[in-house]
Amino acid sequence: MLLVETFAAGPLQCNCTVIACADTKDAVVIDPGGETERIAEIIAHYDLTVRSIIHTHGHLDHIYCTHDVKRAHGGDICLHRGDMFLYDGFAQQCAMFRLPVCGLSPIDRFVQHGDRVALGKHGLDVIHTPGHTPGSICFEVTDGARTVVFAGDTLFRRGVGRTDLPGGDSGALRRSIRERLYTRDPHALVVPGHGPSTTLGEEARANPIVRA
């Protein structure tokens, strides 16, 4: 069984998730863009051990509090190498959004398509979905009959991630969604980087920008 807590974090309301194996209490924090106190409360409430801090991509609203979470709870910081230019540009991103520059911890593990991030008796499968950024990735996990895809800013409910920022590519984004997301279980729950959840099947049928 999995424990999953998702909440909007930071000034840009990025969806941050704490996900854990209920049996082993091993946890992964996805996209810690803020709300470090809430993250700490969830970890303490369930008596969790953070094994990894993973990022769907390197934009500021998804990485802003990574250093604080790492310092407080440990865990390997994971990112796709394609977004290292964004991670290295942390200070410039802070200036762009007029946010104070806080600490930045080094990446512990570069993940790529087909990798698996351990989560107790479960695991998060890495799906490389370039387009919003070159290193955008989604994470898929199955718990019994339930499959969840953490899609970052690749796919939203009735929308997709913007591609007008450095490294964005609208053609690559459409290919990623059609070839690497819509080909999966249509009943899979999608937790996007912002906004409400959806399913892959709903978006394949009704997404106004990218349909199957």
Image (spheres, rainbow, N blue to C red):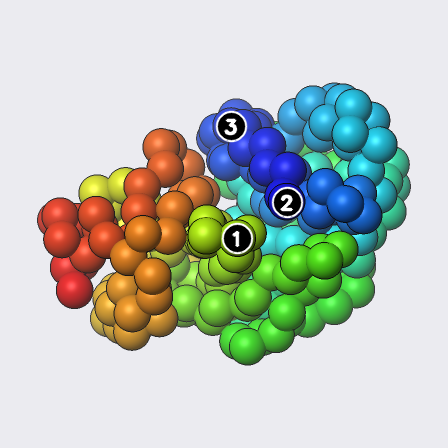
The foreground one among 64 and 31 is: 31
Position of the N terminus, as image quadrant, is top right
Q: In the picture provided, is 179 more to the left or to the right than 34? A: left
> Do the residues bearing badges 2 and 1 touch, measured as CB atoms within 8 Å?
yes
Which residue occupies 80% across, 52% down? 51
- The residue carrying pointer 3 sits among few (fewer than 14), some (14 to 19) or many (20 or more) residues within 10 Å by Cα, namely some
Q: How many tags in the picture?
A: 3
Q: Secondary structure at mark 2?
A: loop
Q: In the picture provided, is 74 more to the left or to the right than 194? A: right
Residue 185, above or below 31: below
Q: Position of residue 206 (x, y in %)?
A: 13, 48
Q: Amino acid at mark 3?
A: Ala
> Which residue is denoted by mark 1 in the rendering?
144
- The residue carrying pointer 1 sits among few (fewer than 14), some (14 to 19) or many (20 or more) residues within 10 Å by Cα, namely few
> Which residue is denoted by mark 3 in the rendering?
8
Residue 205, above or below 191: below
Q: Amino acid at mark 1?
A: Gly
Which residue occupies 78% across, 23% down? 45
| Residue 164 seen anywhere in this rendered image of the structure | no
Q: In the picture provided, is 130 more to the left or to the right than 52? A: left
